[in-house]
Image (cartoon, helix red, strand yellow):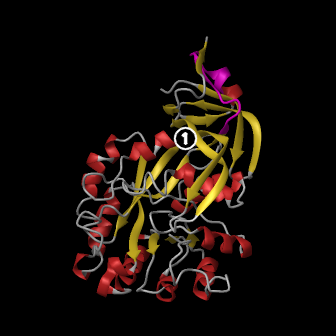
Amino acid sequence: MNEPMIIQNGLVIDPEALTIKEMDIGILNGRFTPDEEVLEKVHQKVQYIDASGYYVSPGFIDLHAHIFKDCTELGIDPDLVGVDQGVTTIVDAGSSGYDNYSLLKEEIINNSKTEILAFLNISRKGLCHGLSELANLDDLMTLEEAQEILKKEKGIVGLKARMSGSVVQDSGIQPLKHARKLADELHKPIMVHIGNPPPKLQEIFPLLEKGDIVTHAFHGKKHGILKESGELIPEAIDAIRRGVRFDVGHGTSSFSYKTMRRFKEIYDIAFTISTDIYKKNYSHPVGSLMVTMTKLLSLGYSLTEVVAAVTKRAADTLHLTEQGTFKYGTRADVTIFGLEERNVLLADSEGEELACHQILTPYMTIKTGKVAYQKEDGIKNTRAL
């Protein structure tokens, strides 16, 4: 049984109400509980976390990362970019496929403090044999294989299809048509990577349905979601109306301040924030989920909006009813972070630098009611008699 815990004096961000107020958060048996109930019903020592001067949020969720280390050229240690950076849940976005998901689970998922979910690549090979995994249509996972693995593996939350020219080569739109058939049968969403065509977005977006996710939505490449006028292309508008979700998916070459500014000027449309973090972009330009959030904050999005994009919205996107909320009875995943006054230059994927005057920094990560990470010179963690 987890030790009872009360997080005191923090600035609590409610991503559902989009409010910030100072209050205490109670945790009992790994679940959120009224703090007075924590004190009434237990006969143990209560662990008090003094969060004075820090923000307290439901645990951050990174919808798009690559953590299949040693088996792909992209893979990075999940805890390094997970709980150590205030991220309680990471979704690996297509590093593994039918042939090697069991290895991802055995080697990485089962040995990480960070919770790891996965979008399964529609190629059986995933990214374990290079980054053109959809060039050969013979490598596509069959419906029977998909049904078999999803019945067994509850950590698979959807399918991943990387629809850009370097990945599909001569296969064009066919891999996504195949993914659509699988998703319809499995009742799972598709996360679609967009980049340089072919195929064009005019072919991709009409195949997407409610609950599907477009990652790298705000890249700076040609043939993106915005017309020269700054307005969304008609196919993107139609997709959003159907309930397709847009995701940042920063990555090495997939996030543009220019695109994001133009989008923000015209549209008040919710999106999720994710990193597409991996070994080569960890230091630059991505950094972490909090660094990526800092960039959106510096572009003019509010702190509550930015936090909602990695908590409630991310949880809703994945249909995770236990996460992204402080509702009593739900799993006690918590991110405690600072908002430091600091002048830094942060680059997007196009090389543009943005002057940021505040930066989000991790201080403590609580996973299912237990401290999974604590900055050494950060919050005092004390036990009351």
Can residue 321 be spotted in the picture?
A: no
Image coordinates for residue 308, horizontal then vertical, percent: 65, 54
Q: Is residue 111 left or right of residue 358?
A: left
Which is more toward the observer, 15 or 361? 361
- Residue 383 image-quadrant placement: top right
Which is more toward the observer, 217 or 309? 217
Residue occupying the point 47% across, 41% down: 83
Q: Amino acid at mark 1?
A: Asp
Residue occupying the point 67% across, 21% down: 40
State yes or no: residue 65 in magenta: no
Image coordinates for residue 377, horizontal then vertical, percent: 56, 26
Residue range in magenta is: 38-55
- Residue 128 image-quadrant placement: bottom left
SS under mark 1: loop
Relative height, residue 121 to residue 100 (above, below): below
Can residue 157 be spotted in the picture?
A: yes
Residue furthest toward the top? Answer: 385
Q: Which residue is mark 1?
A: 333
Relative height, residue 106 to residue 53 (above, below): below
Residue occupying the point 64% across, 82% down: 232
